[in-house]
């Protein structure tokens, strides 16, 4: 008989996940099982899986002192990913609501394949410190719906991104992201690709504003991508130059997220804030 497991469905601005509790690390999910759970017609449906496991119970988290819980994030195709910005907030919401953590007593530290991420409450819900970022080299991006290839700015926020500036809201809306954009040169590990349009004016009351759509590697277009939102804000800030603000509002199809850049001892950090929602819980049989 097929094994039954507990799950909770959650999302952050429409970027949705199947949360699977596996505190002691006894569950092994194959790539095909992850893909089946994330299938929107024959499974629960989601952009990825968040497996909840104690850091000490997974090799990637064994040395993460101070982070009791590890977010084992898998894309909808089953592939493992370094990080997921929206996923960290949904993960934190699950830990808090199930009594596994108390974010009001102290900032919540969770392990990821991109290191430990620290979360606190914010006006939008939860804020995660994504850590130090890097503005990488440029690449060329071809996408269906764009008349010519466009330059893309590489940004690393714990996972790889390429950000493309568009000239108008019309260009953004006409993009066909049912087809994966082509990158040249193609990053070794692939990359999420963000397409952005600046607001007019770009900055109002000290806050920059942009709109964005994203194609996530291993998933396709999603309603939101937390690390992609951070990468997009960082790229536009980089293009805007030294006078650019350190606070940004980013509109995605699933809602609005906030980005802050703050100085720290090891360099500038990028922080992402937004809501997290748990929708329902149940049990499912694994194929």
Image: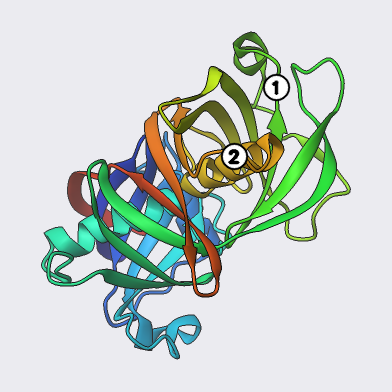
Position of residue 126 in the picture relative to residue 245 (left or right)? left
Task: Identify which residue is drawn at 13% across, 58% down.
Answer: 97
Task: Identify which residue is drawn at 65% across, 43% down.
Answer: 242
Q: How crowded is mark 1: few (under 14 residues within 10 Å), some or many (20 or more)?
A: some
Provide residue 141's location: percent of width, then percent of height: 81, 34
From this view, report whether residue 95 is shown above or below residue 220: below
From this view, report whether residue 31 is shown above or below residue 218: below
> Could you tell me which secondary element the residue under label 2 belongs to?
helix
Task: Identify which residue is drawn at 58% across, 62% down.
Answer: 158
Q: Of residues 148 and 127, which is closer to you in this image? A: 127
Q: Of residues 185 and 270, which is closer to you in this image? A: 270
Query: From the image, which quarter does the C terminus lie in?
Result: bottom left
Q: Of residues 20 and 240, which is closer to you in this image? A: 240
Residue denoted by label 2? 232
Spatial separation of the CA atoms under disc 2 and disc 1: 12 Å
Q: Which mark is residue 218?
A: none
Q: Decide if residue 223 is in sight here.
A: no
Query: From the image, which quarter does the N terminus lie in?
Result: bottom left
Task: Identify which residue is drawn at 42% across, 36% down.
Answer: 40
Outermost residue to the front: 243
| Total numbered labels | 2
Q: Which of marks 2 and 1 is nearer the N terminus?
A: 1
Residue denoted by label 1? 166
Q: How crowded is mark 2: few (under 14 residues within 10 Å), some or many (20 or more)?
A: many
């Amino acid at each position: 008989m097929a094994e039954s497991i507990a799950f909770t469905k959650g999302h952050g601005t429409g970027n949705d996940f199947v949360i699977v509790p596996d505190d002691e690390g006894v569950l092994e999910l194959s790539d095909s099982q992850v893909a089946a759970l994330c299938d929107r017609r024959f499974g629960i449906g989601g952009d990825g899986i968040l497996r909840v496991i104690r850091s000490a119970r997974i090799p990637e988290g064994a040395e993460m002192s101070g982070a009791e819980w590890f977010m084992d994030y898998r894309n909808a195709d089953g592939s493992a990913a370094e990080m997921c910005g929206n996923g960290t907030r949904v993960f934190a919401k699950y830990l808090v609501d199930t009594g596994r953590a108390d974010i009001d007593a102290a900032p919540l530290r969770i392990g990821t394949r991109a290191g430990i991420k620290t979360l606190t409450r914010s006006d939008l819900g939860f804020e995660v410190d994504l850590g130090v970022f890097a503005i990488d080299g440029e690449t060329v991006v071809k996408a269906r719906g764009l008349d010519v290839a466009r330059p893309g700015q590489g940004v690393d926020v714990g996972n790889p991104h390429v950000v493309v500036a568009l000239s108008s809201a019309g260009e953004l809306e006409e993009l066909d992201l049912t087809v994966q954009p082509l990158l040249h040169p193609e990053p070794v590990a692939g990359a999420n690709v963000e397409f952005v349009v600046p607001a007019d004016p770009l900055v109002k009351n000290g806050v920059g504003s942009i709109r964005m759509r994203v194609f996530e590697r291993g998933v396709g277009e999603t309603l939101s991508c937390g690390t992609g939102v951070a990468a997009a804000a960082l790229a536009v800030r980089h293009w805007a130059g030294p006078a650019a603000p350190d606070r940004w509002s980013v509109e995605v199809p699933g809602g609005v997220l906030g980005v802050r850049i703050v100085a720290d001892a090891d360099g500038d950090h990028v922080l992402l804030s937004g809501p997290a929602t748990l929708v329902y819980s149940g049990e499912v049989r694994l194929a």
